[in-house]
Image (cartoon, grey):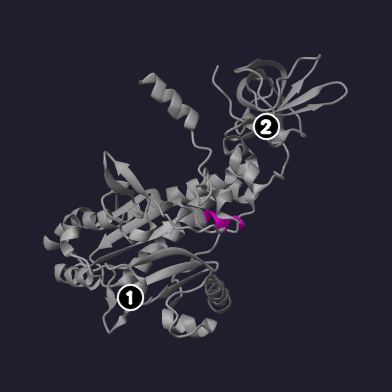
Amino acid sequence: MRRTLSTELPHATPGQTVRLQGWVHRRRELAALTFLVLRDRTGLAQVVVKDGQQVPPEETTVEVTGIATANPQAPGGIEVTEPVITALTEPAATPPVELWRPAMNASLPTLLDHAPVTWRHPAQRVKWELAAASLSGFRDTLDRAGFTEIHTPKFVASATESGANVFEVDYFGRPAYLAQSPQFYKQQMVGVFERVYEVGPVFRAEPHDTVRHLAEYVSLDAELGFIDDHRDVLRVLRDVLAGMVSAVHERAPHAVELSGAEVPVVPEEIPVIHFRDALALVGAPEDEPDLAPEHERALGAWALAEHGSDFVAVEGYPMAKRPFYTHAQPDDARWSNSFDLLFRGLELVTGGQRLHRPTSYDEAIRARGEDPAAYASYLQAFEHGMPPHGGFAIGLERWTARLVQAANIREVTLFPRDLNRLAPDGACWRRQTARQFA
């Protein structure tokens, strides 16, 4: 007999035999009968148990075969009666939190320490459903715009952004590093495909212990060639954000409702303010090299009040604060053709125009006091002809955290890695595998 999912049960014909599979979400014992609430990947179904039939403990995986029966009080108006309940595993241990409760009143350390179980809670799992829908919208939008998805190495021979913020690893007896971004590779692939994107992990060895930083996070990167300047990049970014929002509405409406997510409206044109004007607006010194978190929040409030937008792009960051491959503003080399996109007062995206001429790279690298020969494998793409190009990177966890108004980015990260946390880590699996191949 074909399996019936919880969302399909309301469409079953009363009297029809159905077969459900899932977890025992809750057992509710009344005087004459017991209700078993079964949970599967699509939702909840109600099963009526009579005559003292035993129901396995919560979280035990079971198969239930019974009769679809109309009941206006049941989810979707249909419940399962006369059930035959078969446990598919041993009785489950008591979970660290009561997963059947509507809200999960547990501390963040408890949620993270028991993530393989606590992510089962419906109110928790919808956070990742929002992230998954956003990923789908990111990919779909860029696919339609002629981009090619790529995957680049995460072991690299040198730092991309800064040597101070990389994780060094032993790579067969010689030093290597975990990639801070796919920047060098995605630029090189512009010389092949013109337009590329990647979804993958990036690693930052920054000693931050804040609610907005992670040592490993998912980066949504895109790079495109034959642009005029960074504004072309921003226009593509705007379309990508609109595609992500559309996918959230289309693919995860239940997750939006259950999580209370505030899904933004992406304006046809994202408001832009120059860095020097942003400093003046927030009352910061004109020689400030970067925006502080309180500045970002003030700019977010300004964008919402003045433009009705949850987004604002700050362009023209000082060249001194941007990576060496960043293109300078043509009329004033103090400023860069780059931007940060703020989403509700928090930096979400960094992007901009890159250098594309070999002579420009030679000058930029020597200005850092380095030898261009150290970047030979990277620079060969430019020596053989590269178009004007640029790109951006979106932090998936920051995006999702803003959607659900999470106080801490770890709330929306499946298995967060930060200054203090390296678990759950699957160590038992690794030890077992090592013994098998010993």
Residue 152 visible to the viewer: no
Q: Quadrant of residue 116?
A: top right
Q: Position of residue 56 (x, y in %)?
A: 70, 20
Relative to the observer, which residue lies in front, 62 or 416? 416
What secondary structure is marked by label 2?
Answer: loop
Residue at screen point 53% across, 49% down: 420
Q: Callout 1 environment at 10 Å: few (<14), some (14 to 19), or many (20+)? A: some
Q: Residue furthest left?
A: 384
Q: Point out residue 369 in the picture as x, y percentages from the top left corner.
A: 23, 70
What amino acid does circle 1 point to?
Answer: Met
Alpha-carbon span between mark 2 and mark 1: 52 Å
Residue at the spot of label 1: 319
Magenta span: 399-407
- Please name the residue that numbered disc 2 is placed on: 95
Magenta stretch encompasses residue 93: no
Q: Which numbered disc flags the more N-terminal residue, 2 or 1?
A: 2
Q: Is residue 116 visible?
A: yes
Between 18 and 40, the residue placed more toward the observer is 40
| Residue drawn at point x = 17 percent, y = 69 percent | 362
Outermost residue toward the front?
Answer: 173
Which numbered tag is attached to residue 291?
A: none
Q: Residue 208: x, y in percent?
A: 50, 59
Q: Position of residue 400 (x, y in %)?
A: 53, 54
The image quadrant where one finds the C terminus is: top left
Q: From this view, report whether residue 50 is shown above or below residue 311.
A: above
Q: Residues within 10 Å of mark 2 (few under 14, many from 20)?
A: few
Q: Is residue 81 left or right of residue 366?
A: right
Q: Is residue 432 left or right of residue 94?
A: left
Identify residue type, mark 2: Pro
